[in-house]
């Protein structure tokens, strides 16, 4: 846990070379990385595993335009500060691109609320449990392959119309 009020809460730096600054693994110490954050002199890349050796049964995407048409982009205001942005509602996006969404709609979890003690360590209020929301998330990068396939379908349709 790293917190700050003003300056960076966490700073990672490579000295004199480009490359991975943070690796993500699933499993024990012998596991291969499943993602990383890497830096160069001028940029940052957020990488997820995509090597062909990890994949099988490759198939071209089909009906990308229909899937894009099913997306429901919206402009919304964040409750926290009222700032407006373009995006999606996670549970709606999950219907079209489930791999772009983490979590479950309307999920909650129980958590422990610790006991309240006085200065001498006597319990004033017993420990109890509460319930909090567990929010869904979206990995926007997972939308890109569908958009590229849709553009390719549109190009093919345009080329077909040009030849008529």
Image: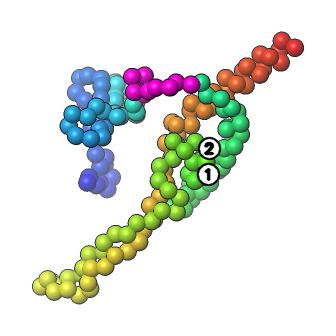
Please give the label number shown on residue 36: none
Please give the label number shown on residue 96: 2
Residue 81, above or below 27: below
Residues in magenta, as a range? 50-59
Does the stretch in magenta take in 58?
yes
Q: Locate residue 36, reporting x and y percent.
A: 34, 33
Provide the residue designation for mark 1: 92
* Left or right for 6, reference 75: left
**Of all residues shown, which one is farthest toward the left?**
120
Label 1 SS: helix
Q: Residues within 10 Å of mark 1 (few under 14, many from 20)?
A: some
The one nearer the camera, 44 or 159, is 159
Q: Locate residue 129, reporting x and y percent.
A: 34, 76
Residue 62, above or below 100: above
Does the stretch in magenta take in 158?
no
The one nearer the camera, 25 or 42, is 25
Q: Quadrant of the C terminus?
A: top right
Residue in the image at 77% along x and 16% along y: 159
Label 2 SS: helix
Residue in the image at 83% along x and 12% along y: 163
Q: Locate residue 133, reporting x and y percent.
A: 45, 65
**Of all residues shown, which one is farthest toward the top?**
163
The one nearer the camera, 164 or 6, is 164
Residue in the image at 39% along x and 31% along y: 49
**Residue 126 visible within the image:** yes
Residue 10 figure quarter: top left
Q: Locate residue 34, reporting x and y percent.
A: 34, 34
Residue 76, above or below 27: below
The one nearer the camera, 24 or 59, is 59
Residue 136, above or below 114: above
**Of all residues shown, which one is farthest toward the right?**
164
Q: Residues within 10 Å of mark 2 (few under 14, many from 20)?
A: some
């Amino acid at each position: 846990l790293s917190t700050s009020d003003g300056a960076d809460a966490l700073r990672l730096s490579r000295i004199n070379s480009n490359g991975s600054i943070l690796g993500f693994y699933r499993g024990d110490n012998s596991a291969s990385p499943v993602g990383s954050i890497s830096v160069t002199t001028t940029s940052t890349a957020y990488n997820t595993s995509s090597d062909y050796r990890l994949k099988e049964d490759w198939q071209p995407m089909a009906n990308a335009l229909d899937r894009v048409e099913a997306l429901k982009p919206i402009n919304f205001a964040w409750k926290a500060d009222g700032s407006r942005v373009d995006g999606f509602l996670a549970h709606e996006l999950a219907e079209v691109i489930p791999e772009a969404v983490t979590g479950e709609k309307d999920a909650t979890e129980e958590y422990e609320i610790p006991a309240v003690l006085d200065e001498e360590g006597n319990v004033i209020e017993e420990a109890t449990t509460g319930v909090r929301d567990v929010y869904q998330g979206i990995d926007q990068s997972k939308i890109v392959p569908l958009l590229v396939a849709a553009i390719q379908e549109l190009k093919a349709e345009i080329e077909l119309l040009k030849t008529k």
